[in-house]
Amino acid sequence: MKKDIVAKGAILQRDRETYAIAPHIPGGITTTEELRKICDVADKYGIKELKLTSAQRIALFGIREEDLDDIWSELDQQPGAAIGLCVRSVRICPGTTWCKRGVQDSVSLGLKIDAIYHAMQLPNKMKMGVSGCMVSCAETAVKDIGVMGTPKGWRIMVGGNAGARPRLGDLLVDNVPGEEEVLAIIARIIELYRNWPQEQRLGRIIEEIGIERFRHEVLGTGE
């Protein structure tokens, strides 16, 4: 029986014959040239449907297995990490780049996070989100690591997810002053998570040990 082909970023579809792929589009920010390329490849290989995903990518559906290598070669893009035990996505809102409500530059910070962590192998899947204000269009409260801009800096939440057993993230720290400080805290979260003995979502770890102990492990404060 056919299965997902993780090495090619290919997800087996409902018909159990064809696959879907999703090229990596950091933060959902792309160009007309890249969009034309995707459309040209879709036309050439008779791809049945394109879909904008919640991870800010464009998924291509109905691909034959024998066409996967050629399609990736012609797209000349990295696969989005839609499957596997890794950092699946870093969702980014427009922030102060475009949005009138933005109070922090979520695009600058989010693209830095994406460049470091996208597709990084971890004990379980992880999703991240970066919002430029408290409207939270990147849905930071239901991400494993969510970063939200406030008038006083950045708020970091941990342990959220929106799966079959949804969980709101816990506040880890507030009023983080700048990007470098945020990146340093995320690095400590990832280091702790990679070395944790159980292979489970971040939220389950926090449920087991409590946010105070988790905060102490990451920041040296709390309990």
Image (cartoon, rainbow, N blue to C red):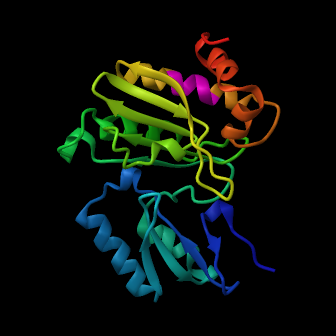
Magenta stretch, main secondary structure class: helix
Left or right placement of residue 152 versus residue 160 in this view: left
Left or right placement of residue 137 versus residue 206 in this view: left
Q: Which range is magenta?
A: 185-190
x%, y% of residue 190?
61, 30
Q: Which quadrant holds residue 13?
A: bottom right
Q: In which quadrant is the C terminus drawn?
A: top right
Residue 187, magenta (yes or no): yes
Residue 108, placed above or below residue 124: above
x%, y% of residue 192?
68, 25
Q: Which quadrant holds residue 165?
A: bottom right
x%, y% of residue 84?
67, 55
Residue 129, placed above or below residue 154: below
Q: Which quadrant holds residue 49?
A: bottom left
Q: In which quadrant is the N terminus drawn?
A: bottom right
Q: Residue at x 67, y 39 (%)?
A: 203
Q: Residue at x 74, y 73 (%)?
A: 3
Q: Residue at x 44, y 22 (%)?
A: 174
Q: Residue at x 61, y 38 (%)?
A: 159
Residue 8, placed above or below residue 90: below
Residue 97, magenta (yes or no): no
Left or right placement of residue 158 versus residue 32 in this view: right
Instruction: Name the residue nearer the viewer: 93 or 191.
Output: 93
